[in-house]
Amino acid sequence: MRDKVLVARQVPDAFIEQLKQFSEVEVWQSELNPMPRALFLEKSKDATVVITTLSEKIDQTFFEHAKHIKGIVNLAVGFDNIDMKLATENGVIVTNTPDVLTETTAELGLTLMLTTARRIVEAARYVQEGNWKSWGPYLLAGKDVYGSVVGIYGMGSIGEALARRLQGFNCKILYHNRTRKEDSERTLNVEYRTLDELLNESDFVICTAPLTEQTKGIFNRTAFKQMKNTGVFINIGRGGHVIEDDLIEAVKSGEILGAGLDVVENEPINETHPFLDMEQIIVLPHIGSSTVQTRNKMVQLCVDNTKKILEDEEPITPVNIKKT
Ligand code: 8YV
């Protein structure tokens, strides 16, 4: 009997056809809505591999259902939806999609910095709503990214790709990372700072880090208080790094100027979320890696990792178990 691959989100047919060449495939036919949890668990019972997104929580209950599972192939570089300890204890390989999305995600980070700093959403709305009746020298005046001090929290490949772009803006680039990156310091001219120093000195603080137990809620009241009153906070990592009430308070009380967020704690949010009442906070619907080219590369990598797992070979981008 052929192995079953459960694809928890609709992806283009061409990729499903590839999977069908070496497995039985079941696909959840909705691109925008996640598979209901109960159905996902039920369909996982006889699956050898599941292709997941951040919406699928891989926890104890999952492993109690998925008795035949060999691989969890995550369509994301981050894997905070997966209990890695349990996966490894159960001998289940986890793969992710690094590298292919690095440049696209860094580009979105820069876009969000510029959009927030130059008040682009507010300005476009101003025109759309028919308010552009006259002009003044300080109309919708923003803040320069050019020549500013940028603090990058998380100097992984996305942080590095962002630093390369910011050099073109003549920025002074600071970073904080759990380990010092001496290579990046040499090649990218970035300077290490403690988190406190980074918050104090930066005009823009941008979070690109993966979410871990240690980084949950790290951008809280104390952190925002340390930022400049003219400081802008950008998040392209995970919403869980931020205490959202503290961010709202910091913006309302003028402790920081504003924020641009591609990620929030509980995604998706609806129009009742307090962020959406605030001009100085821009929220995007988690589109960091969302270009057609990059999505195709991510899905192809998932197909290739699945094939390797089913063939008992080393996957291309394993996160935990490595064959020797
Ligand atoms: C994914 C992401 O598109 O890769 C990540 O970690 O956050 C995005 O690129 C999203 O998480 C869907 O799984």
Image (cartoon, rainbow, N blue to C red):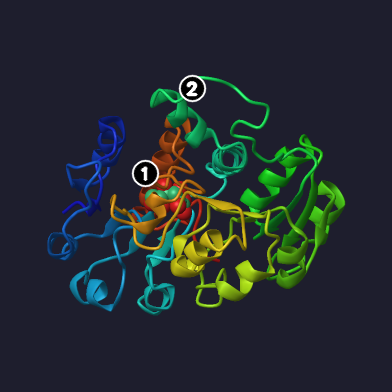
Q: Looking at the image, which is closer to me, 150 or 319?
A: 150
- Tag 2's secondary structure? loop
- Tag 1's secondary structure? helix
Tell me: is circle 2 under 8 Å from ligand 1: no
Q: What kind of residue is marked 2?
A: Trp
Q: Can you see residue 305?
A: no
Q: Earlier in the sequence, mark 2 or mark 1?
A: 2
The residue that mark 1 highlights is 303
In this figure, what is the number of numbered marks? 2
Q: Position of residue 65 (x, y in %)?
A: 18, 72
**Quarter placement of the C terminus:** bottom right
The vertical placement of 128 against 150, above or below, is: above
Q: What kind of residue is marked 1?
A: Val
Q: Position of residue 45 (x, y in %)?
A: 16, 66
From the viewer's perspective, is the residue at label 2 or at label 1 nearer?
A: 2
The residue that mark 2 highlights is 132
The vertical placement of 220 against 167, above or below, is: below
Q: Position of residue 101 (x, y in %)?
A: 53, 43
Q: Looking at the image, which is closer to me, 102 or 221?
A: 221
Q: Residue at x 51, y 54 (%)?
A: 317
